[in-house]
Image (tube, grey):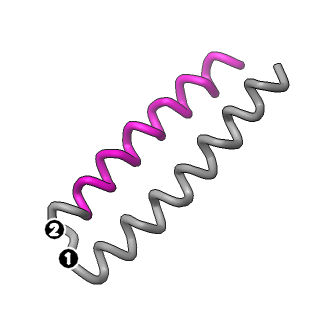
Amino acid sequence: MNSNKQTIQELENKISALKEKMITTGIEKGLTHDETVQYSQELDGVINTYNEHFLKDE
C-alpha cells in the first residue's frame, strides 16, 4: 500500500511538471505547435494511468 501511495505521488508530480511544460510551450510556441501537442498527449497518458490507479483503489 505504501508503494502504491508513492506511485500516486510520483504520478501527481509528473502531471504537474508536464502541465507546466505544456502551458509554457503553448504560450511560447503556440497551442498547435508539435512540441505543445506532444506534451499534451504525454500528459493525457499520465492522467489516464493516474485515473486507473485511483479508480482501482476505490
For the record, the magenta segment spans: 36-58
Identity, as a three-letter code, of the amino acid under mark 1: Gly
Residue 43: say if magenta: yes
Q: Name the main secondary structure of what is drawn in magenta.
A: helix
State the residue at coordinates (39%, 37%): 45
Instruction: Measure how far apart labels 1 and 2 are at the Cα level.
Output: 5 Å
Q: Is residue 55 left or right of residue 34?
A: right
Q: At which x and y percent is residue 19?
A: 46, 61
The picture quadrant where one finds residue 4 is top right
Dot label at residue 30: 1
Q: Is residue 37 left or right of residue 39?
A: left
Q: Quadrant of the N terminus?
A: top right
Identity, as a three-letter code, of the amino acid under mark 2: His
State the residue at coordinates (26%, 63%): 36
Q: At which x and y percent is residue 5?
A: 77, 31
Dot label at residue 33: 2
State the residue at coordinates (22%, 57%): 37
